[in-house]
Amino acid sequence: MLIAVESKVKRAGFIAMQAVDSVCHEAVNDFVARHLNAQQEVHTDGLAALNIIDNTQQHEARVTPSELVDEWLPWVHIAIGNLKAFLLGTFHGVSGKYLHEYLSEFCYRFNRRKMEKEIPNRRLNLAIIMR
C-alpha cells in the first residue's frame, strides 16, 4: 500500500492511499503522478523503490529507527491507525477484492472532515443545478 499524507504543522491535511500488488518503481511513479504536485517536498522511509520520487519531487528518504518514526513521518502512522479503526469498526474486516473501494471511501471521508458546514449549501447547489 502507498500512502501520502499532507503535513500541516499540528494536523494532517489531505490524504491519498492506493493498494498496489508490489511497491515497485512503476507503482510509485503512477501514485506520485496522480496524487502529488510537481516539486513538492516529500519525506519517505528508506525503501529503495521510492527513490524514483527524486525525478519529480524534492524527495528526502531516511531510514528511521522505530522510536523516531513519528518525528520523520508524523501523520502516516496516525492515518494507518485511523484506517485500521475505520475498517474494523465500520466493516468488521475487509477482503482484498474490494480494498481499493474501502481506501477510496476512507480518503474521501478524511479529506472532507472539515467541510461539514458546507454540505447543506453544496447539496442545495447540486439540487438547483440538476433541476
Image (spheres, helix red, strand yellow):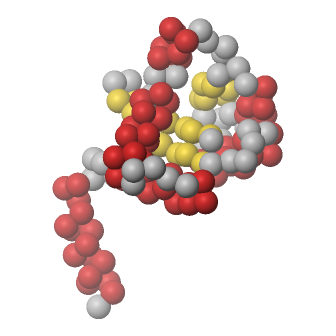
Give the position of the C terminus as an image quadrant.
Answer: bottom left
From the top left corner, tell me how far across and down residue 45 is, in percent: 65, 22
* Residue 124, quarter of picture: bottom left
User: Which of 102/59 is in front?
Assistant: 102
Residue 103, given in percent of the width and then of the height, sits at 50, 52
Q: Is residue 29 above or below residue 66?
A: below
> What's the residue at 44%, 57% (across, down)?
105
Residue at image coords 39%, 50% = 92
Q: Is residue 100 visible?
A: no
Quarter of the figure that contains the N terminus: top right
Residue 4 in picture, x, y percent from top left: 55, 38
Residue 66 visible in the shown view: yes
Which residue is outermost to the bottom? 131
Q: Which residue is located at x 67 percent, y 28 percent?
A: 58
Residue 29 found in image quarter: top right
Q: Vertical placement of 67 versus 70: above or below?
A: above
Residue 68 place in picture, x, y as percent: 51, 9
In the image, residue 20 above or below residue 77: below
Left or right: where 30 falls relative to 110: right
Viewer-proximal residue among 88 and 14: 88
Q: Nearer the viewer, residue 47 or 42?
A: 47
From the viewer's perspective, tell me whether residue 102 is left or right of residue 92: right
Q: Please determine whether, in this image, residue 127 is positioned above or below residue 61.
A: below
Count of numbered tags: 0
